[in-house]
Amino acid sequence: RSLLGHADGDPQTAALAREGGRAYVSQSLRPYVIAAILDREPERPAIVVAGDDRGARDLAAGLKAWLDPRDVRYYPSRGVTYESHLTPPPHLVGLRIAALDALLDGRAESGPHRRANPAHPGDQAPVVVVSAVALSETVPDPALRPQTFTLQTGDLLDLDEAARDLVAAGYEHVDQVEDRGQFAIRGGLLDVFPATEDRAVRVDLFGDEIESLRWFSTFTQRSLGDAERVEVAPAAELAEEHRELAEIAALEEESERPDIAELLPVEDFHPFLELASPNASILVSGEEDVTPALADHWQDVCAAFHDEDAHHLYVDPQQIGEALQDRARIWLSSIDQDQRLQFHAQAAEVAARGVREAEPELEKLARSGYTTVVAFARRGEGERTAYNLGRLKVRWLESGEPPLDGGGVITFAHARLHLGFIAPQFQLAVIPEHRLFRRRRATPQRAEPRRRGVLRSFADLRTGDIVVHEAHGIARFAGFDTKTVAGVTRDYLYLEYAGSDRVFVPVDQLAKISRYVGAGGAHPPLSKLGGTRWDTIKARARRAAQELAGELLNLYAERKRREGHAFPPDTDWQREFEDAFPYSETPDQRDAIEFVKGDMEAPRPMDRLICGDVGYGKTEVALRAAFKAVQDGKQVMLLVPTTILAQQHYGTFTERLKDYPVTIGHVSRFRPAAEQRAAVERFTRGEVDILIGTHRLLSRDVRAKDLGLLIVDEEQRFGVKQKELLRQLKLKVDVISLSATPIPRTLQMSLAGVRDISVIETPPEGRRPIKTYVGEYDEELVRGALERERARGGQAFFLHNRVETIDETAERLRGLCPSMRFEVAHGQMDEKTLERRMLAFLRGDVDVLVCTSIIESGIDIPQANTLIVERADAFGLAQLYQIRGRVGRSRERAYAYLLYPSAAALTSEAAARLSALSDYTELGAGFKIAMRDLEIRGAGNLLGDEQSGHVAALGFELYMQMLDEAVAATTDGAGPDEDWEPVRLDVNVDAYVPSDYVPYEQAKVDIHRRIAAAREVADLAILRDELEDRFGPIPDPLRNLILLQQARIKLGQAGATAVTFRGGRLAVTPVELDSVRAKRVRKEIPEALYESGRSQFSMRVPEDPVQRFPAVVRAADVLLAVTREAA
């Protein structure tokens, strides 16, 4: 903030602040000039008017950095129109309430509403940045809002009453909190994500008293830190009774629906500027943006509303214009119209590849007399940069310091700035870190990957699923049942078999159960208990699996036997290229990159599958491998399934490799035939290093001079003949396959251990799950979705997969949303038209792209965050998953609407597909989708005709386990690690998950799976911490369940396989102890005996099981400690 002093001595700034009027300001300099003017009157509230919501949000962020610690708020538009009858999303409501309350300056204190932010730092008045569209919407009087309430440590809180208050305040009651405006109650815990906060809060009660408040991450559900007091502002702008009327009306047929103005207390709706304090200073930023934005929005309103209703709920541009002319003192523009006052600057853009390259540029500015400041979002990055500087000295700008002297000083500041500038007028250069370097080294918080279940399935187990028990056969999972047997209470899996047979399986046998996936969509009859039929089926299938294992291994052994090219270790160029990546790699991405480079440096052909969700960074892995290959004189082919994806990859590779002597060719129908022939000929002569294209690359005339690496994107999209050509190539060169939803055969090869696989499952920083809606087609829903997306400055895809009727569909949509810009794209268009339309959409010149499934692969348009699929029932599951991945590639929340004509027309298979997609909305669900698709369609001819009968009889997962065992036995004579068997141990103590502690079934399934899957004591410690954090103090039965598994793990690591109780003694076998270790055991447990002949440890234990349990835990601790000691 002290840098604002550079403007103090400037006569133009002083004249603008004193006299007001119009001025020219360069776009990059705008936040600085506005901040310098506002800083002259810190005690006066200010309103800054920007063009659209995005511009207002960016300007607010800039002002926040310059004016810190002054309170700067962003007031967005509602995000939905009044006529849609939809309530604004809670995160927008939170921003609007916080900004409006900051301006009201205590006026609402006397009403039923209490301000969410009653205090401002020091005596400085707030600054509110508002968009033109938000100005044109009337605002409900704050007295109409639900009440804000405070949560404070030590206060009393009735959970039932709190739930009613939260629902009345617009909050949604959910099982698990993931977004603003949601709350969940579990036992004595309340989780709530206040609309005005950036983090959710966990309220831990002791009785009715708030014992603690903790912020927590909605991604990991783990606590982040303590809070003393939290304001829970409403998540809605209107009280419950007014919202309900609008919601009921929204369900009516359009012809019978009352006007929204009849349902709302419009007499209490006011223009924003009327609610603002009369002494507020008003400044217009970007006059050239504000006036057209007001006019466009009013035109849209008039198209949707009767004139009278429009005037009740919106403010016409003339009224806003008059109010601004009357009250706004300063009007800024970035269009030079010979204004008397002018502020010129150039954008700060050094774009160096590293510190040493940036240093001369900074030095030149400093020696030219500029006060030169580099802003770092994280101080640690600045400290590292300062350490690596050679000649220049660095001074850190600390908060509250006086203005810096100009000239010759390099200053580092800890601030988050988007725009920088070089302003001769102020002799000031401010450069954000991301404008200094070509990369942003921001380090995201490591998100815990979702744990895979012990069910050997990538899909979740749900009540009613068909499952396979290794010992008993095919059954229906009927849920968990907590039963007391012989005075001991445990959780059991309740399995239903043929007839009225049923089995209650102890949860410690969860590893013996897998979800049934057969060869066809249907499942075979449930098994009958007893008899030898199931054992016979298993034996037959095991023999077939052994034969298949031999075939698979022969295929892959041939590849491994062949000599491949061993690439050299990384060069300086490789490290420099990787440093230039503009984002931080996720941990999984880093692992995948290292595995790929390790494979390339090995002297055998690589065949690695990179499986990662859409937008998780698979392309960057491919880029680094390609660059490594090219540096060693080898050529690279990148094979993709669609023309558009080829174009997109060509753009990405060209941009990333532009600073290196790498020649990239592109073969697709977007290119004239002569250009394609020339690219192929140059590739044959070795003049093209990387050739990118569709299946055209597999033609006979495409011959590389020295091919070293083949990259295949979405291999499952290629045909049988193309796959055979690929298989032959794989025996000769290194191959990387990229996939978001691996086809079952690929998945099977990888799971069987005969193909290398790297999974990228950590989402990039800021990525949020896609909200998926499945339902019947409804034009009002479509209109609301499209308008909501445009209102937040985004774009949408509308997928209509019939070329014959796509233009007709686009016309229908134009009639539905006349103010929006539509364009049509499909694969049968001529290349030039298609390319032109796609580029127009990419530039943002089109609001909605009406298209076919041509968008399925690879299109990356971060500002497109709404997808509507008109006939979702006509697509396969993996295909729908790929299509849905076209949205949700930025920090904005994305929405996918999967629509079908009517429920009556849905086949059971289509219904199952759509249900699966709405289930798997979490980040990184590609593996689950692949397995679920397999379940719906059946494994079919996955492993060939000979094997499909065994898959049908046993289920895919149990058969895969047998294949896995057969492969492991054939290769090294040992079973795979996954066949870890827990120690047989049973102590008659209560061990279960109480329903009053974990009230919903899905979380219970997850807890049992994680306990049964734990292979290390550390896994259980993490789970224990998480349970206490999420659900409160762990009750004794669940603590016992965890301790039992902990004892099994420790005893297993000591070499034991079984624990028995006989004659008042506990016996553990086998345990190998030499005389030194046996003495050590007796020292720790004097009553212990060790029989070396039988490899048995034993000790006296109480008869009472409750007292016996601690002795078992102690024995496990001692035996593990002793066996790990050096002799």
Image (cartoon, grey):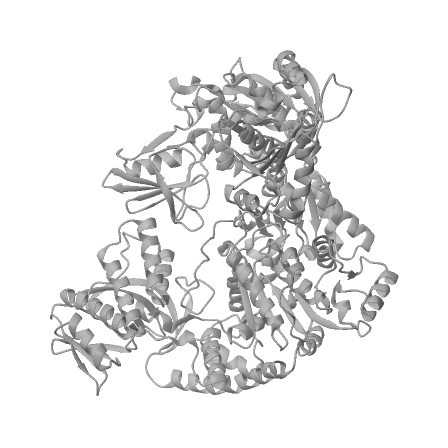
- Closer to the camera in the image, 46 or 987: 46
Q: Position of residue 975 (x, y in %)?
A: 43, 81
Q: Is residue 479 left or right of residue 2?
A: left
Q: Position of residue 524 (x, y in %)?
A: 46, 75
- Quarter of the image for the N terminus: give it: top right
- Closer to the camera in the image, 578 or 875: 578
Is any part of residue 374 visible from this angle? yes
Q: Position of residue 1031 (x, y in %)?
A: 31, 50
- Quarter of the image for the C terminus: give it: bottom left
Compared to 880, does 246 lie above or below? above
Is any part of residue 309 visible from this angle? no
Quadrant of residue 79 within the rendered picture: top right
Q: Is residue 1105 left or right of residue 198?
A: left
Q: Is residue 191 left or right of residue 418?
A: left
- Closer to the camera in the image, 859 or 1054: 1054
Compared to 312, does 934 lie above or below? below
Q: Is residue 834 left or right of residue 715?
A: right
Q: Position of residue 394 (x, y in %)?
A: 56, 38
Compared to 625, does 109 lie above or below? above
- Closer to the camera in the image, 27 or 753: 27
Residue that sits furthest to the right in the current view: 674
Residue that sits furthest to the front in the current view: 391
Quadrant of residue 612 within the rendered picture: bottom right
Residue at the (33%, 79%) spot, across then down: 529
Figure disc tally: 0
